[in-house]
Amino acid sequence: MEFALSEEQQELAGTVRSLLAKRADPAAVRAAMASETGYDEELWQLLCEQIGAAALAVPEAYGGAGFSLLESMVVLEEVGRSLAPSPLLASVVTAEAVLAGGTDEAKRRVLPRIAAGEVAAFAVPGEPALFADQAPVLVVAGDGLVLASAAGEWVPSMDQTIRLGSVSYAAGEPIGDATAAAARAELVGAVGVAALSAGLAARALEMTVAYAKERVQFGRPIGSFQALKHRMADLLVLVEMSRSASLAAAYALSTGASNAEQLAHVAKSYCSDALTTIAAETVQLHGGIAITWEHDAQLVFKRAHALGQLFGTARAHRTLIEL
């Protein structure tokens, strides 16, 4: 079976990439991660107003755009490519959790807020969660599903482009079934991280190839050396396989396919491992400049390790794959 994005989905990806190229250059990324909120609030507003990023997978009945989860993953891949700190994954996961476990009343009240661009987070007590300290819409899965009455506390992370927070207990208004919500959140989160990883992997390879064409050693661009050509060709295979695994899982999850859970585990484990390898090679092939704070290679390396832990490690997901 041949699988490819539709013309509309390709246009969506192109539009998001164009916006991020203008508003999430290296200087903007560094400013955002050093800010009090940990992300660029103006960029988030643009993504929500011009692209409808937070509303894509929310049904029209709840104020959303009525598209599928696949469109959200297409946008997440571009966000991953840009390295921009963004609450998009947190909001997508929260919306899907409420759709899966929330009561009808909760869906009518919570989902329109998420679709409108209010930052949302889904947390389990005692565990770090994306944007749990910044989200006006904080959904917590404890003994029951709860709409929290207060934000969580900030949790420092190695990767400053990923904002984490935690809640110690579930205090607030009961809104549904925690088990169903948590199960959906874990799957969507894993596939969302795979999409972020696939986008970042492509960005890292592009950076490396561009540098290899410009860096001259022994009177020749280093990209002309056969050994480096082979290494970059191997990286291209990892990038393309990552994107295939990510899109396959996103499509299966968005259509409710019977093998969606299996493909989610495959995508998360493969994309995490591939990005770890690609990030390490990016540092190596950039030479000494890659270990300086001024270069994006160190951001790629830290993001790769952070994504490798988020929503389960590659090893944990591999143990869940049924052979």
Image (cartoon, rainbow, N blue to C red):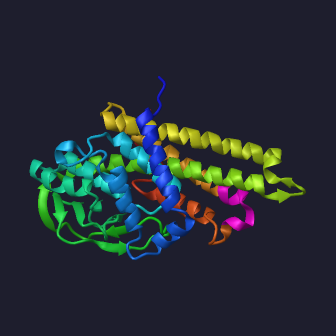
Q: Is residue 36 above or below residue 200?
A: below
Q: Is residue 54 in the magenta section?
A: no
Q: Is residue 117 visible?
A: yes
User: Which residue corresponds to the image point at 77% horizontal and 56% vertical from the top-left?
Assistant: 214
Residue 202, given in percent of the width and then of the height, sits at: 58, 48
Viewer-proximal residue, 76 or 140?
76
Residue 145, given in percent of the width and then of the height, sits at: 17, 57
Q: Is residue 86 above or below residue 54?
A: below
Instruction: Classify residue 306 as left or right of residue 122.
Output: right
User: Which residue corresponds to the image point at 18% horizontal and 56% vertical from the top-left?
Assistant: 110
Q: Is residue 266 visible?
A: no
Viewer-proximal residue, 83 or 287?
83
User: Which residue corresponds to the image point at 46% horizontal and 44% vertical from the top-left?
Assistant: 13
- Location of residue 156 by image quarter: bottom left
Residue 17, given in percent of the width and then of the height, sits at: 49, 50
Q: How many marks?
A: 0
In the orientation shown, which residue stands out farthest toward the right?
219
Q: Is residue 237 above or below residue 218?
A: above
In the orientation shown, which residue stands out farthest toward the left?
105
Instruction: Classify residue 289 as left or right of residue 23.
Output: right
- Location of residue 289 by image quarter: bottom right
Q: Where are the magenta residues, as a range? A: 282-290
Q: Is residue 157 above or below residue 48?
A: below
Instruction: Report the magenta stretch's main SS.
Output: helix
Instruction: Classify residue 127 as left or right of residue 23.
Output: left
In the orientation shown, which residue stands out farthest toward the top?
1
In which quadrant of the rendered image does the C terminus lie? top left
Q: Is residue 284 in the magenta section?
A: yes
Viewer-proximal residue, 54 or 287?
54
Residue 46, given in percent of the width and then of the height, sits at: 37, 59
User: Which residue corresponds to the image point at 60% horizontal and 42% vertical from the top-left?
Assistant: 238
